[in-house]
Amino acid sequence: MATLGAFVTIDKSSPIADPAPVLQKGIPTSHIVPTIHELDRLNFGNQYSGPSRPQSPHGVQASVTPNELEMSHPPSPINEDAAGVVQTLSNPPMNKHRLLSACLMCFGNGINDSAPGALLPYIEKHYGIGYALTSTIFVTNAVGFISAFPLTYALQARLGRAKMLVLAEAMMVISYIMLVCTPPFAVVVLSFFFSGLGMAFNLALNNTFCANLANPTTTLGFFHGSYGIGGTVGPLMATALVSRGGGNRTAWSTFYFIPLSVTAMNALIAYLTFRRYEADNPAPTPLHPASSHPERDFSPESKFQLLKESIRNTSTILGALFIFAYQGAEVSISGWIISFLISYRHSEPSRVGYVTAGFWAGITLGRFLLSHPAQKIGEKTAVAALTVGAIAFQILVWQIPNAVGEAVAVSIVGLLLGPIYPCATAVISKLVGRRLQMSSLAGISALGSSGGAVAPFFTGLLAQQAGTWVLHPICIGLFAGMLGCWWGLPRAAKRRE
């Protein structure tokens, strides 16, 4: 013991009074104040895993259902601009056929828009009317476009893509049936309402489809390039048909058997290619909100709310004004350049009827050849440069006192205008976001494309009083308006990782 005592010192002080309580199992401990480290853990736990589970009176956590367990985790971030699965022409495989169908419909639209330019002199002669009254066909066409705006989104949601496209083509078929009957002029005016309504439907749906494929600017270039092909062959066929009609006063109406056949074929192809479109593009779910199918929004917002929001969107408003000016200049040139050449260059209708075809050929080449380089350069810069070039050559068309020189200059104007529409559609579709894409593009197609009716109408009214030379200052003013709207568009937000 003595040896042990050399190594161990025994403290004989008094025992500790009132020792700290010892935690015992089964006794509630809610009255104990947590330490700083425990508070930090509780705070971060609430932030990342939600509030803690309620405790039983004995400190045991209550049972958790599978749904509660899932909801206890942080929600997936919802971002309408998040990158979903981008479809390509080969995924799903039917997309290549759908793009072909969309291009054929746009081809039919081009025939519809370009033919009146070559037929107007014959329609005026047949009914014995002037420029102002003839221009009313453009007004009802605009009314058709505008009427489609509030209907497109709702009808597409109710009918589905395939039936909606069939309905669009059916509206155009009704228009052509009315025209081939050579009706009174009032019925001719009414027929252009149905063609405008059908075109607005198929443009909104097909623009949305192409804008959501990989390489949208290039895809839209091919889509709208098909419109240029239709615009090229339309005046050629119309001029050849009415020129060979001799004294037949109804030769102009016979032309409409051609677009009638094309549109009926397009309705069938559209149904066959798009009938499984919804199956290939499943509706988004709460766990997968980002989808390449923007027109079916998972949120419970009403269609009216989406429509109202798209109308108030800055990009939608400026985009509609931009396309309004673009389409106004494009269709005004196509519709009135021949009348200008006949009145001021004293050309024969049968000889200058092909000038419109040259203009649309330029648009076609521009869309096929310049859309991809414009995407590489940057759509915003490319569109501004192309518009300035179009202004310069439109001035040449006005000032060159030679029909051949003017025909060449008009073709170059078409070449420069060609890639502008697909570039603008690609840019605006990115700016508005996926949730508003369908309603915004429908509004741009409807309200914007109505410029292709309003501007030619006012050109005709002014031409009745002052002469068809007013075409050129009107187009130059529209090009200037395009530049203003384009520079006013907001910058595209950089992608957030």
Image (spheres, rainbow, N blue to C red):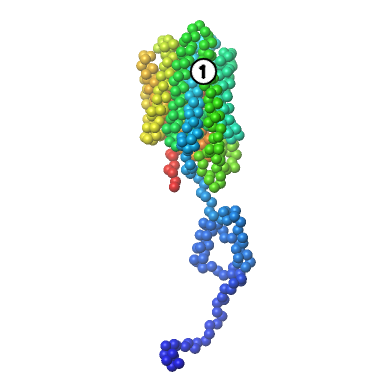
Which of 236/403 is in front?
236
Q: Quadrant of the N terminus?
A: bottom left
Percent x, y for residue 381?
Answer: 38, 34
Percent x, y for residue 437?
Answer: 51, 36
Is residue 159 shown left or right of residue 404?
right
Q: Is residue 208 visible?
A: yes
Which of 27/391 is in front?
27
Is residue 151 shown left or right of residue 396?
right
Percent x, y for residue 27?
Answer: 61, 71
Q: Is residue 427 visible?
A: no
Query: Which residue position is annotated with label 1?
Result: 258
Which of 406/57 is in front?
57
Residue found 52% across the figure and 8% down from its top: 248
Residue found 52% across the figure and 86% down from its top: 14
Looking at the rendering, which quadrant does residue 2 occupy? bottom left
Residue found 45% across the figure and 88% down from its top: 9
Total residue callouts = 1
Farthest residue to the front: give it: 93
Farthest residue to the bottom: give it: 2
376 up-or-down from 118: above or below:
below
Residue found 59% across the figure and 37% down from its top: 303
Query: What is the crowding at mark 1: few (fewer than 14 residues within 10 Å), some, or many (at least 20)?
Result: some
